[in-house]
């Protein structure tokens, strides 16, 4: 009751405040807006959340978030291109999709190898990736892992595991971000962009 | 499917993005977090939202958001102090509660008088306020309306309506906000603070 609302409303606000991007104050505003726009916001949101909560699961093939055995990408026959893009997380998969440049299927690892945190290949669905690349006779595996030390270690480990299959293996290009200004870039990125320079 | 998630998940994200404080990008992050922390976040949130959606209504007495005939404030016998604080919106009521300095009950107008927008006294629950002040034999009515032209016009109109009852009528003090710096204050506020100066 500290905030002036009834207990169920306060509980809703407290839960919404735990979402990333919403603090206690914006959660309060969001809840109020929801209650005020009941037909437009609260009822559809409740229906959508309820549907997601009952149907959401992991895609059997790529571990993306799905609402059936396969996610919408794996279920799309136009995306059976023989290209598998390996990402660390579902958030990275969604980021790749926003890029809109990839037309194949994904494989979500669920993290990166980390000796410190005791994360080994089995925890990351790497054996599943090898099995899948073999079973699907993939032409190319694109390693879209983060450009961190753990991400690059994981990429090299996966490349070693896939080597016997003779599948093409690639990683995302390193270079200057689109719209990026040299003056604000770290030295490593500038160096990598120079090494990978292209004729125009 | 544009974002890489299945249709029900995309629908949930689109609805969450309509909440104030969340854009398309943060709605996506929030939805992902919810799905990942299912037991901790999604299930309790669904339960809380469902409870609020089925129970939420307007308090019969003050028009605050309530989950029964009376809101938690009106149902609290400790707050029957004979003081009624008049606010424009539920958000303003919650802001007053955060201040923590008021121990009486509220009356939410639902807006301010506006000749331009055709908002008259009946639309604002002003007759209900007069009836209520009389029925409850209120000692004081505090007009906590925004310090805007429409807010102050409405305050004067309400004061006129309440005059025959002989109830004490007050408004919030105008002055320097706590933590405020004079150099950044508008001239009107400085003038009002000077006129209302207090001996220390």
Image (cartoon, coloured by chain):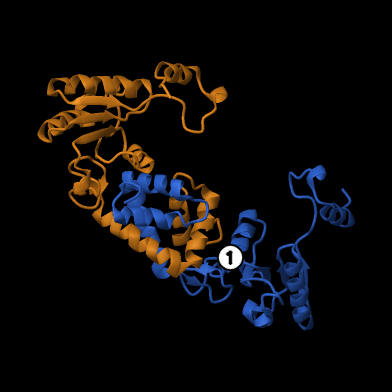
Chain colours: A orange, B blue
* Relative vertical location of residue B82 with respect to residue B4 in this rendering, above or below: below
Residue density around tag 1, few if under 14, some if 14–19, many if 20 or more, within 10 Å: many
* Nearer to the camera, A77 or B37: A77
Which corner quadrant of the image does residue A95 belong to? top left
Q: Which residue matches tag 1?
A: B90
- Total numbered badges shown on the rendered structure: 1
Q: Residue at x 45, y 46 (%)?
A: B26
Left or right: where B198 falls relative to B114: right
* Nearer to the camera, A2 or B38: B38
Q: Residue at x 61, y 66 (%)?
A: B89
Residue at the farthest front position: A200
Left or right: where B73 falls relative to A132: right
Q: Residue at x 56, y 60 (%)?
A: A4
* Relative vertical location of residue B68 with respect to residue A18 in this rendering, above or below: below
* Nearer to the camera, A127 or A10: A127
Which corner quadrant of the image does residue B136 belong to? bottom right
x, y percent for residue A134? 11, 30
x, y percent for residue B194? 88, 53
The chain carrying label 1 is B
Q: Residue at x 20, y 52 (%)?
A: A68
Q: Secondary structure at mark 1?
A: helix
x, y percent for residue B7? 30, 55
x, y percent for residue A71? 23, 48
Which corner quadrant of the image does residue B73 belong to? bottom right
């Amino acid at each position: 009751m500290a905030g002036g609302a009834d207990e169920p409303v306060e509980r809703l606000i407290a839960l919404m405040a735990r979402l990333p991007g919403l603090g206690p104050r914006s959660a309060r505003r969001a809840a109020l807006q929801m209650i005020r726009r009941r037909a437009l916001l609260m009822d559809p949101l409740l229906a959508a959340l309820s549907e997601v909560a009952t149907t959401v699961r992991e895609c059997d093939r790529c571990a993306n978030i799905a609402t059936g055995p396969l996610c919408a990408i794996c279920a799309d026959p136009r995306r059976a291109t023989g290209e598998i893009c390996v990402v660390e997380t579902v958030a990275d998969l969604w980021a790749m999709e926003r890029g809109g440049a990839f037309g194949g299927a994904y494989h979500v690892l669920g993290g990166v190898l980390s000796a410190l945190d005791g994360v080994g290949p089995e925890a990351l669905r790497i054996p599943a990736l090898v099995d899948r690349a073999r079973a699907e006779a993939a032409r190319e595996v694109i390693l879209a892992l983060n450009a961190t030390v753990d991400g690059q270690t994981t990429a090299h480990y996966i490349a070693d595991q896939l080597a016997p299959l003779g599948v093409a293996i690639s990683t995302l290009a390193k270079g200057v971000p689109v719209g990026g200004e040299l003056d604000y870039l770290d030295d490593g990125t500038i160096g990598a962009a120079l090494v990978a320079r292209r004729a125009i």
